[in-house]
Amino acid sequence: LGSIYNEDPYQLILRETLRMGFDIQKIMKQAQKMQEQMAAVQDELQHIEVTGSAGGGAVTIVGDARGEVKSVKISKEAAEDLETLQDLVLAAIKDLNKKANDVAQDKMSGLTQGMQIPGLPL
């Protein structure tokens, strides 16, 4: 057991992969393909508009599916009470982030379909 902790982790993974009969080149090609697909999805996410809101639209925040905020709109009524405004802005940001995460998760879920990667439940 002690020798496992002293061994180079890459060598350990390689040895275990070969011992289990996995084709390391196939795994590396799949990983490279997945990396390219992830980059494409990240690019796509920056072009998908997502809107978060609170207070029945009193505060609206627009961003992309990565969660990057692009604009904030606040109604005059919401701006009258500072404490309420703070709560509404926070709620709208949370709404935006949830929607952005849902879109991103949906787009990313397709990446591993059809790939046979050892150790991953697909």
Image: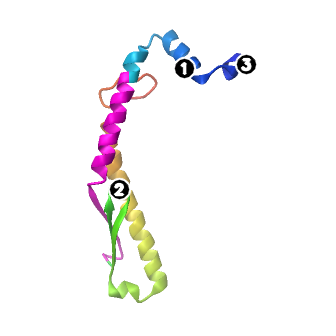
Q: Which residue is located at x 60 percent, y 23 percent?
A: 9
Q: Which residue is located at x 43 percent, y 16 percent?
A: 24
Q: Earlier in the sequence, mark 1 or mark 2?
A: 1
Which disc number belongs to residue 2? 3
Q: Which part of the image, by quadrant, shows the C terminus?
A: top left
- Would you say 4 lies left or right of 47 here? right
> Mark 2 is on which residue type?
Ala
Q: Which residue is mark 2?
A: 100
**Which residue is at the front of the view, 37 or 94?**
37
Q: Which residue is mark 1?
A: 13
> Mark 1 is on which residue type?
Ile
Q: Is residue 26 above or below residue 63?
A: above
Distance in Å between CA atoms under marks 3 and 2:
45 Å
- Residue 34 % position (x, y): 35, 32
Disc 2 is placed on an element classified as: helix
Q: Is residue 76 above or below residue 87?
A: below
User: Are there few (<14), some (14-19), or many (20+) residues within 10 Å of tag 2?
Assistant: many
Disc 3 is placed on an element classified as: helix
Residue 89 sits in quarter: bottom left
- Residue 16 % position (x, y): 54, 15
- Would you say 47 lies left or right of 23 here? left
Q: Is residue 47 above or below residue 56?
A: above
Query: Residue lying furthest right in this view?
Result: 2
The magenta segment is 29-57
> Mark 3 is on which residue type?
Gly
Look at the image and say whether residue 44 sits in the magenta stretch: yes
Decide if residue 16 is in sight here: yes
